[in-house]
Amino acid sequence: MGAAGVRRRALTAAACVGVALIGACKPAPDPIRVERGRLIVENLTREEWRDVKVTVNAYYHGGARTLPPGGQLEGPLGSFVTGLGQRFDPARERIWRVEVRARDASGRPVVLDWTNSSQRR
């Protein structure tokens, strides 16, 4: 094989390694996301979360008893309610803060906060 063939193979191998590294360096998804009128909370840890409480804009609440590792808690924004039973209305209100509180399997607190100050009214 000539020098040109060796260079071509080396470039091809380097390109393959570069593509593999780009895929491996992809950032992890946000554990709190708003997509198409739904709130998604994802457990990106290796431990189950217990007594998961989600608070939207300091007033609207939701949650679940448990959230397994890699699991998602997902629901329409309108399913979050205040203590007086008022539902979140995505047509009138924007999300500016989401707080998630839970305990992991060892009893340690799980705390996730998401803030979008540009949406606060």
Image: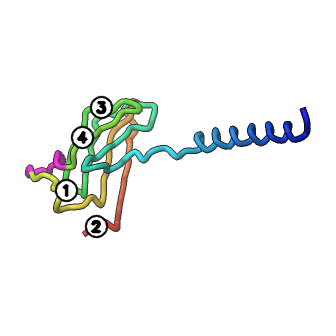
Q: CA distance from mark 4 to mark 2?
A: 23 Å
Nearer to the camera, 89 or 80:
89
Q: In the rendered image, which residue does mark 2 sit on?
A: 120
From the image, state whether disc 4 or disc 1 is nearer to you. 1
Amino acid at circle 3: Thr
Q: CA distance from mark 4 to mark 1?
A: 18 Å
Q: CA distance from mark 1 to mark 2?
A: 13 Å
Nearer to the camera, 44 or 105:
44
Q: Is residue 13 left or right of residue 59?
A: right
Q: Residue at x 29, y 61 (%)?
A: 96
Highlighted range, magenta: 78-85
- On screen, 58 above or below 22? below
From the image, state whether disc 1 or disc 2 is nearer to you. 1
Residue 15 x/y as whole percent: 70, 42
Amino acid at circle 4: Gly
From the image, state whether disc 4 or disc 2 is nearer to you. 2
Is 77 part of what is drawn in magenta? no
Q: In the rendered image, which residue does mark 1 sit on?
A: 90
Counting residues from the start of the chain, the first of labels 1 and 2 encountered is 1
Residue 48 x/y as whole percent: 38, 30
Q: Residue at x 41, y 33 (%)?
A: 70
What mark, if any, has residue 66 been given in the picture?
Answer: 3
Counting residues from the start of the chain, the first of labels 4 and 1 encountered is 4
Q: In the rendered image, which residue does mark 4 sit on?
A: 63
Q: Is residue 85 left or right of residue 118?
A: left
Quarter of the image containing the C terminus?
bottom left
